[in-house]
C-alpha cells in the first residue's frame, strides 16, 4: 500500500453547501441526491455536500452479487434492516448508525472530468481525516476504498452523470459490526472492516481515551474536503432538509 497525501486544490474557492441528515431512511436521501444532481447540472442549486447517518440499510451496487448477501430478506426485516438496489458502482455494502456517509453533489467540469481522479480525491480526504485522529490509513493499489493495514475503514461507490456526482463514500466511525456479518462487504471475502473508534482504541496512551464523535469526524471531513477540492463550506441553517451542527 502507498500513502498519497497530495492536496489538489481547485483553481478558485467556490461555495459548497453542507447539509447534515441524522436517522435518515435510504430512499428519501437517494431521491434528494438525484434531484440535486439535476439541479446542480442546470445551475439551479448550489453544489452540495450531504453528510448522512442512515438507518440500517444494505445496498446493492451495479456489480453486486446476490450471494454476497448472507441472509434472506425475512431475516433482514426482523433485524430492522432495509435492502436497496442502487445505481452506484461497486458490490454490496452496509450503512447504519455510527457511520458517516458522504454524498458530494458537485460539478467536476471543467478541469476534474476524470472518474478515477475523483475517487482518488475522495480517498485522499478520508486518509487526511483519519490522520487527524492519529490513524494511519492508506490506499490499496488492488482495491478501492481506504484501509488500515488489511482492514477497510472507508468504502467508495459513485455515480456521475454529465460530470455531476452523486453517491460517494462511507467512513466507519463507530458502527454496529454485527450488521457487517450479514454480507460480504464490497464482495471482498478475505478482509475485515474496521472503524475510527476501533483503531483509536488501539493507539494506547498516544491519543486521548475517548473515541472521536460523529460530529467531530464530520467537521474534519468538511474541512479537508473543502481544502482538497477548493471550496468554501457554508453549513445549512436549521429548519429545512438539513441542519448545521450545534
Image (tube, rainbow, N blue to C red):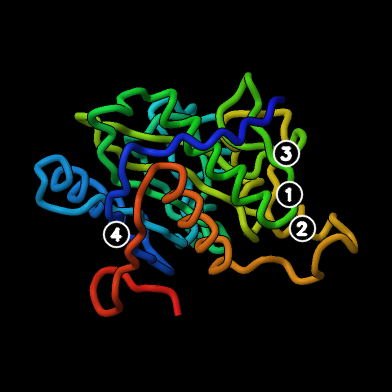
Distance from disc 2 to disc 4, alpha carbons, whole Å, reads: 30 Å
Task: Name the residue that disc number 1 marks.
Answer: 135
Residue 122 has which mark?
none
Is disc 3 placed on a helix, strand or loop?
strand
Image location (x, y in percent) of residue 186: 56, 33
Distance from disc 1 to disc 4, alpha carbons, whole Å, reads: 28 Å
Of pointers 2 and 4, the one earlier in the residue sequence: 4
Q: Who's the residue at 46% across and 57% down the image?
A: 222
Residue 200 has which mark?
2
Is disc 4 placed on a helix, strand or loop?
strand
Of pointers 1 and 4, the one earlier in the residue sequence: 4
Q: Nearer the viewer, mark 1 or mark 3?
A: 1
Distance from disc 1 to disc 3, alpha carbons, whole Å, reads: 12 Å
Task: Name the residue that disc number 3 marks.
Answer: 151
Q: Is residue 239 above or below residue 64?
A: below
Q: Nearer the viewer, mark 3 or mark 4?
A: 4
Q: Who's the residue at 65% across and 61% down the image?
A: 174
Amino acid at each position: 500500500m502507498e500513502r498519497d497525501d497530495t492536496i489538489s486544490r481547485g483553481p478558485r474557492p467556490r461555495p459548497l453547501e453542507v447539509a447534515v441528515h441524522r436517522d435518515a431512511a435510504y430512499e428519501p436521501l437517494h431521491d434528494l441526491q438525484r434531484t440535486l444532481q439535476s439541479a446542480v447540472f442546470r445551475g439551479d442549486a448550489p453544489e452540495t455536500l450531504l453528510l448522512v447517518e442512515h438507518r440500517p440499510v444494505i445496498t446493492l451496487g451495479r456489480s453486486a452479487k446476490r450471494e454476497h448477501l448472507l441472509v434472506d430478506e425475512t431475516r433482514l426485516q426482523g433485524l430492522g434492516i432495509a435492502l436497496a438496489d442502487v445505481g452506484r458502482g461497486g458490490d454490496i455494502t452496509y450503512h447504519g448508525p455510527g457511520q458517516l456517509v458522504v454524498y458530494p453533489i458537485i460539478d467536476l467540469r471543467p478541469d476534474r472530468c476524470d472518474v478515477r481522479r475523483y475517487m482518488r480525491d475522495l480517498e485522499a480526504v478520508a486518509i487526511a481525516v483519519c490522520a487527524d485522529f492519529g490513524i494511519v490509513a492508506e490506499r490499496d493499489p488492488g482495491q478501492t476504498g481506504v484501509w488500515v493495514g488489511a482492514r477497510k475503514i472507508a468504502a467508495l461507490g459513485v455515480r456521475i452523470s454529465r460530470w455531476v456526482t452523486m453517491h460517494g463514500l462511507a467512513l466507519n466511525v463507530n458502527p454496529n459490526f454485527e450488521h457487517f456479518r450479514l454480507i460480504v462487504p464490497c464482495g471482498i471475502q478475505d478482509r475485515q472492516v474496521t472503524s475510527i473508534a476501533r483503531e483509536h482504541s488501539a493507539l494506547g496512551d498516544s491519543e486521548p481515551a475517548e473515541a472521536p464523535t460523529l460530529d467531530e469526524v464530520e467537521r474534519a471531513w468538511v474541512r479537508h474536503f473543502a481544502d482538497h477540492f477548493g471550496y468554501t463550506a457554508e453549513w445549512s441553517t436549521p429548519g429545512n432538509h438539513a441542519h448545521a451542527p450545534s
